[in-house]
Image (cartoon, rainbow, N blue to C red):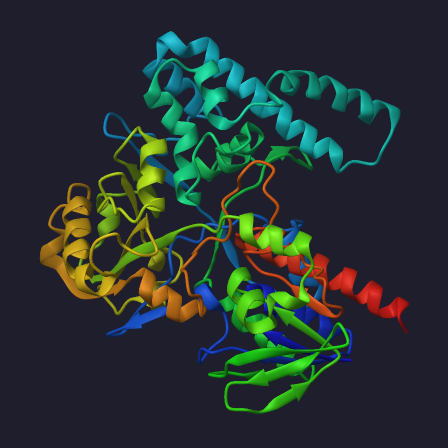
Amino acid sequence: MKIVIIGAGLGGLSFGALAARDGHEVLLIDKNKEPGGVLTLARQDGFCFEQGPLLLTDLAPGDSVWRFLKELGIRLETQREDRGLCTPDFSLNPPECYEGPDWRKKRLKALFPADRRGIDEYYRFYDALTKLRFLAGEKPSALTMLKMARAYRKIKPYENMNCRAFTEKLFSDERLRLIFNGILADFCADPEEVHCLLLPFVNTETAFDKRIPTGRGKKKLYSDYRVITGGCQKLPEALCEYILAHGGTFLPETVAEKVLVEDGKAAGVRLSDGRVVYADAVVGAGSARDFFEQTVGEAYLDDAYRDILKRFRPMEAVFMVHLGVDFDPSVYQKPCLCYYYGSYDLHGAVEKLRNGVYHGGGDGYLIYFPDRHAPAFAPAGCHCVTIYTVCPDRLREGSWEEKKEEYADRLIRLAEKHLPGLSDHIVTKKIMTAEDYRRLTHMSKSSFGGTVPIWKQKNPPHKTPVKNLVFIGQQSENGGGVPLVINGAADAYEKWKGEADLCG
């Protein structure tokens, strides 16, 4: 069969690689010069920068993404990394000398003695949920079911709680609640919107110290966090090379203007230059609303799918300042990535984001060193620094183009509190705004990380009301993040293949 894939981001590449493996004719279309979407590099004056911090799960041997790549014969070198965390009052960076897997728990109890019982309860909840997830993947047996029941009893009291209610029940100190809820701001999510069962999975202890074991013996209980040695762009490059090596075609700098629908079936695409490409199936990615409202046409959808498109909430945008510097910033910041929180009011921070008010870094930002795992990103004697914040897609007052220099300078001044003398060592500066990311991702609204993980929210399904039209990527039912997008695309492909086989 001939399959046209609109968008050479990670979802399209993953779907395309599986289709090419199985002998299908794959045509990959993208408006950019190179594949990868937000995994492409920003380049300037001999420096390369990743589009944000890419510490990824599921890349270790045996994990889902590792298995996916192995089946395709793709091997990428990876290395474990961790992240630091600083608030206005204290920091929780990995200690110089390893203090064991429970060092964060002990440090928190020392910092917040009045909340010691709540901290113990949180970690009982964390361990039970981790064990439950592990047991769910084991071979079913009476003993396994008994162990799952015991673990579930520790989780059951919280099964109907959102993150705000959960942390308020356990912790009296708002500073402690920030430690666990703070990462939700990275998803542009209010703690009231997110189920508390998500918290352990976005606060996995191994994320905060790469020396923490991921399991006991041969049993892996926890994810570890990894970077791709040489840079994240090696992942989309490898997938695109695989597609080309298996007879596929990549058509860069090309826009698919319209999906052709005939008798309720996707029949191909019309390109912006007027060419028509007929196909047996069409796969779309990117902005769900743009794709279905403009490229497909809502008239071809049913009421249920239209309702999902109307209700689901994409994340907001990001503002990044990429700096090439002529000194080693790791002298001052040991982790390659550190979150610097500036506010304890997460609800207020998210409200500002959604109403076009940019905090200028005051609510929080992070600093990332991408050349730590990709030395070739910087010329000899130099290094890369990325300062990153979440932000509104559009500003209530002014435009990003008008404000970007002012906001970049403000972020650099904030970062200088942790990287002394930063301003004096800048060799080059590349600013990336929401407007830049709209152009890069071909979206009318920049949504950098996919969808907000709102409790009970339905995201656009892979299977659409149009036969042989599949929707994948970070705004589909799998949600955002590299592992979810890859695994979601693989799942969507297998379901499509099963239906295509049934239809002969």
Left or right of 161, for residue 19: right
| 54 and 503: which is toward the camera | 503
- For the point 53% across and 31% down, the residue is 200
- Count every numbered label the image shows and give the total: 0
Q: Position of residue 393 (x, y in %)?
A: 34, 56
Residue 67 appears in the figure: no
Task: Name which quarter of the figure residue 68 lies in.
Answer: bottom right
- For the point 81% across and 20% down, the residue is 146
Q: Position of residue 208 (x, y in %)?
A: 43, 36
Against 117, is 326 above or below? below
Where, quadrant-wise, is the C terminus in this rendering? bottom right
Where, quadrant-wise, is the N terminus in this rendering? bottom right
Against 451, is 175 above or below? above
Q: Position of residue 407 (x, y in %)?
A: 18, 54
- For the point 17% across and 44% down, the residue is 414
Left or right of 91, for residue 76: right
Q: Position of residue 464 (x, y in %)?
A: 70, 61
Task: Name which quarter of the figure residue 372 lies in.
Answer: bottom left
Against 46, is 115 above or below? above
Residue 349 appears in the figure: yes
| 239 and 275: which is toward the camera | 275
Against 390, is 143 above or below? above
